[in-house]
Image (cartoon, grey):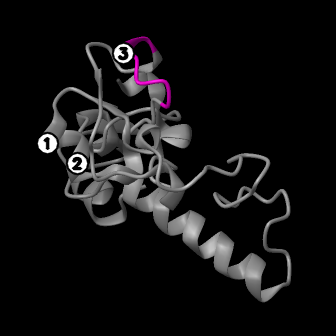
Amino acid sequence: KDGMCPDGLSCFGGLDCNIQDLIRADLEAEQEAAKENGEANEDNGDIDNEEDNPTIEEDIESNHFYCGLDWNVVASDCSSAQHCPSGTDDECELKGAICFGGTECDAAKGHGELFQYLGLPYEDARNRLFCASTWMEADSNCS
């Protein structure tokens, strides 16, 4: 794990923060800044960018197909679940994941947007690995 960090830093896990929360906060800040600058919906990494996320019809069954290891895990964090629009397990990138139907997650509402950046379920321990000089530094900075 230490080989993944820059020289002089070590990799620490089991922290109270999750990289997905930091990415979500960064994306929201970027979107807000873009809106304030009149740049909304341009190619600026905006998760609402129509080129990145084609228009999805509302109220169709396939909008509620999402991958996960069990239905409750999928339902607990729709933002980081992978959408599987065809309803097949083959669409799921996470090893051992199943495409579940009938979830409360909804592609028409933008659920699953974090999966494209992370490719990991929210609960995955790798989301809690951070580089720092000490564990306390990693935990306090979450960077």
Describe the element under mark 1 as helix, strand or loop: helix
- Would residue 59 appear left or right of 44 to someone viewing this image? left
In the picture, the quarter occupied by the N terminus is top left
- Identity, as a three-letter code, of the amino acid under mark 1: Asn
> Rounded to the nearest whole Å, what is the CA distance between mark 1 and mark 3?
17 Å
Position of residue 92 measured from the top left corner of the image (x, y, whole percent)? 41, 20
Secondary structure mostly seen in the magenta stretch:
loop
In the picture, the quarter occupied by the C terminus is bottom left
Stretch in magenta:
85-90
> How many numbered marks, from 0 up?
3
Residue at (20% x, 52% y) in the render? 76
Residue beneath disc 1: 72
Q: Quadrant of residue 42?
A: bottom right
Position of residue 35 measured from the top left corner of the image (x, y, whole percent)? 75, 82
- Labelled pair 2, 1 in contact (Cβ < 8 Å): yes
Which residue in the rendered view is the most extreme toward the bottom?
36
> Rounded to the nearest whole Å, what is the CA distance between mark 3 and mark 2?
17 Å
Residue at (74% x, 57% y) in the render? 49
Question: Nearest the camera: 9 or 65?
Answer: 65
Position of residue 101 measured from the top left corner of the image (x, y, whole percent)? 29, 34
> Rounded to the nearest whole Å, what is the CA distance between mark 2 and mark 1?
5 Å
Residue beneath disc 3: 89
